[in-house]
Amino acid sequence: MKKHLLANLALLAVLGASLVGGVLPVYVKIGLKVIPPFSFTLLRFILASLFFLPILTIKKQKISFGDFVSISVVSALSTINIILFSFGIRLTAASIGQMIYAGVPIVAAVFSYFILKEKITVKKTVGVFLGFLGTLFIVLLPLIGKASSFSGSFLGNLLIFAGMISYSFYGIYSKRLQKKYTPIQMTAVFSLLTALIVFFPALGETVSSHNWWLKIDRETVFAVFYVGLIGTAVYYLLYQYAIKHGSALIASMVLYLQPVATIAWAIVLLGEKTSPGFLVAAALTLLGAYITTRPK
């Protein structure tokens, strides 16, 4: 009975993560209209770090300097992803930015074969091939046709694609750390590390960006707080909860539901449009991700 209840709660966590994560690229794009990328990232992860500080104290989960260094080596891969995403999403559509990340399980399957020596079955090979075609088509949309609201820019798509690759490595190597550290410890170190890395670049932006803070309005403030507290801290906790109390398969459902939520939010809040080509590519990517992660 308890196991069944935890499985249901894990499923609810997936749905919650999909909803709050789906609107994340939209509010990142809204915030970046006013705030430069490094400065926006700094504000985002300062808020996330402040969120985890009292939790670590209450849970009595201390982090030594050695622990910080060990977790930081892997967390840096996710930090690179965050920075590339912040620059890339300014140049492309929010729906495309999220859709590219549906390729994470596909890329992870390939890297796991070379790094972790995991076997790739015929089923996974088909999934990787379909997913790769879909993701590649999305990235190349601006070159295939004229750039528009549903194709974004090639540079923006490429930056996000590179970030997705880095995030895939982060997912592979973080598995080894989960045996020693809790999800709260890992996410807290990741948040603090990212804030420290972008501090000086953000300081340089503040000096050269002609008083961007004077242009901040209520929408921008809401975007910063949403992305920092809900889209980063709460989202990562929900995702980790789904893995802990459900399964990797249940947690991977976020990758299928989140792009749908992003497209819906982008249409409502940003007025973005989709094209038949994008929908076909999105379907291929999602199908490939599903086949790759589906159990026997």
Image: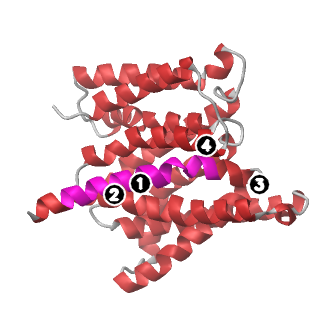
Q: Nearer the viewer, residue 250 or 210?
A: 250
Point out residue 197 in the picture as x, y percentages from the top left corner: 64, 62
Instruction: Name which residue type carries label 2.
Output: Ala
Residue annotated with mark 3: 36
- Mark 2 → mark 1, Cα distance in angstroms: 6 Å
Q: CA distance from mark 3 to mark 4?
A: 24 Å
Q: Rate crowding at label 2 as few (under 14), some (14 to 19) or many (20 or more) other CA atoms within 10 Å.
A: many
Question: Between tags 3 and 4, which lies in front?
Answer: 4
Callout 3 secondary element: loop
Q: Nearer the viewer, mark 3 or mark 2?
A: 2
Q: Are the two marked residues, 2 and 1, in contact with CB atoms closer than 8 angstroms? A: yes
Gap in angstroms between the C-alphas marked 4 and 2? 24 Å
Nearer-the-camera pick, 108 or 2: 2
Span colored in magenta: 6-27
Check disc 1: other Cα within 10 Å, few if <14, some if 14-19, many if 20+: many
Q: Which residue is mark 2?
A: 13
Furthest toward the top, the residue is: 144
Q: Which mark is residue 17?
A: 1
